[in-house]
Image (cartoon, helix red, strand yellow):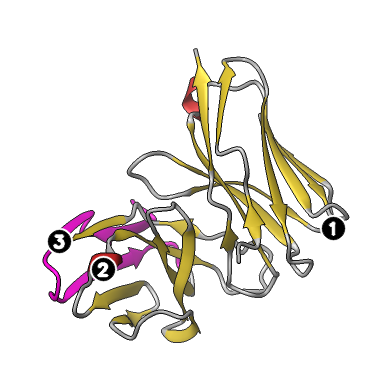
Amino acid sequence: DTAVSQTPKYLVTQMGNDKSIKCEQNLGHDTMYWYKQDSKKFLKIMFSYNNKELIINETVPNRFSPKSPDKAHLNLHINSLELGDSAVYFCASSQVPGRLKETQYFGPGTRLLVL
Amino acid sequence: DQQVKQNSPSLSVQEGRISILNCDYTNSMFDYFLWYKKYPAEGPTFLISISSIKDKNEDGRFTVFLNKSAKHLSLHIVPSQPGDSAVYFCAASVRGNNRLAFGKGNQVVVIP
């Protein structure tokens, strides 16, 4: 009965490869997010989708492409992986902005290591 | 430019005593503030929040205080328990806007 789940939990890959991280939430939320936690431990938003529509796209290289097949899923595809992409990637979800409770609920994270 | 700042990256406290975590922000438009708790190898877990119309919100052992004029908030945990040992993130947003700005976190160690 996990609320926000991500797969895989660990991902080790070579530079130049393409990889995907999957996220699913069963909270009935309309909005989903991807965050990156870098080596300095800062959590920074990358993307946000509201009901399958992209609403936030921070300055992220276009090698990163989010895909939302439905409002319960937000996958992250990364092309041509670089060493600097090594980080922990967190998926999160929340209700529609403007509602009383906008708390974001996070998945367990995907630890990506690019060699 | 970090809009949410958490200094004093680590805190050690004896079990049963009070833990106080501080957070400062620079964006005066922020009107919703949250604290998240994170254990190793897990995602951040929502702990407590406060709206800018309040200056205090309490939930069990956790109390958040907000000082808007100083752009400062704090989290008090009392009494501290060993299970409270974790990294605590302060976050802020403008209500109606999805963007949560996070601090870099404070490590809390509660000594039994």
Q: Residue A72 at what x, y percent from top left? A: 37, 72
- Whether tag 3 and tag 1 are in contact, CB under 8 A, the answer is no
Which residue is labeled 1 in the image?
Answer: B53
Give the mark, 2 or 3, whose residue is nearer the N terminus: 2
Which residue is labeled 2 in the image?
Answer: A22
Does residue A115 appear left or right of residue B21 in this picture?
left
Is residue A30 shown above or below A91? below
Mark 3 is surrounded, within 10 Å at the Cα level, by few (under 14), some (14 to 19) or many (20 or more) other residues, namely: few
| Magenta span includes A7 | yes
Q: Residue A51 at what x, y percent from top left? A: 46, 82
Q: Amino acid at mark 3?
A: Leu
Q: Quadrant of residue A114?
A: bottom left
Dots 2 and 3 on the same chain: yes
**Highlighted range, magenta:** A1-28
- Whether tag 2 and tag 3 are in contact, CB under 8 A, the answer is no
Which residue is labeled 3 in the image?
Answer: A115
Does residue A35 appear left or right of residue B98 in this picture?
left
Mark 1 is surrounded, within 10 Å at the Cα level, by few (under 14), some (14 to 19) or many (20 or more) other residues, namely: few
Residue at the top extreme?
B112
